[in-house]
Image (cartoon, grey):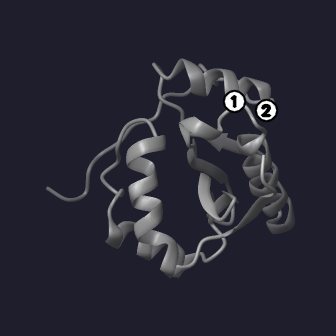
Amino acid sequence: MNELRVRAATPRDLDAVLAFWKTAAEGTSISDDRDGVERLVARDPEALILAETGGELAGTVIAGFDGWRCHLYRLAVHPDHRRRGIASALLTAAEDRFVRLGGRRADAMVLQDNGIAHHAWTAAGYAPEERWRRWVKPLTP
């Protein structure tokens, strides 16, 4: 594998990230559009973390910290680059960021029926928290 580079996204990366998620990420979100990702990067320039190999985008994770809780979203690795340590490198970068910011525990958004993701999260030391369920309400029609 080419050398892996992990870095924060910049506004120039956003179109590539959105296209990447269509190939590499499971499911979609109401926030998966240019405006949503632009707001994320403008508000927290280090939250969207990219992994590149050979100059190409190979993985992403969003490491959001609200000052109290650490949240992980959009861990995605391109199918051609899976099982090469990219997800682990992204999670290490995210967890290091959380520790620097004073975070104490990270939680992850993981689709219930995404078995591949379950294996990756388990291997990284995460476990489902069955006592809690996520409740959502769209704020736009």
Residue 24 visible, this angle: yes
Task: Identify residue for label 2.
Answer: 124
Residue 61 visible, this angle: no
Measured as percent of width and height from the top left, residue 13 is found at 51, 73
Q: Is residue 108 left or right of residue 83?
A: left
The reply to whether the C-beta atoms of the residues labelled 2 and 1 are less than 8 Å apart is yes
Residue at image location 79% in from the left, 63% down from the top: 97
Between 139 and 28, the one nearer to me in the picture: 28
Examine the rendered structure and indicate whether residue 79 appears above or below residue 100: above
Between 129 and 15, the one nearer to me in the picture: 15
Amino acid type at image mark 2: Ala
Examine the rendered structure and indicate whether residue 35 appears above or below residue 76: below
Measured as percent of width and height from the top left, residue 43 is found at 53, 78
Measured as percent of width and height from the top left, residue 46 is found at 66, 72
Residue at image location 55% in from the left, 27% down from the top: 132
Q: Which mark is on residue 121? A: 1
Q: Quadrant location of the C terminus?
A: bottom left
Residue at image location 65% in from the left, 34% down from the top: 82
Binning the other alpha carbons within 10 Å of mark 1 as few (below 14), some (14 to 19) or many (20 upward) gives some
Measured as percent of width and height from the top left, residue 65 is found at 65, 62
Q: Secondary structure at mark 2?
A: loop
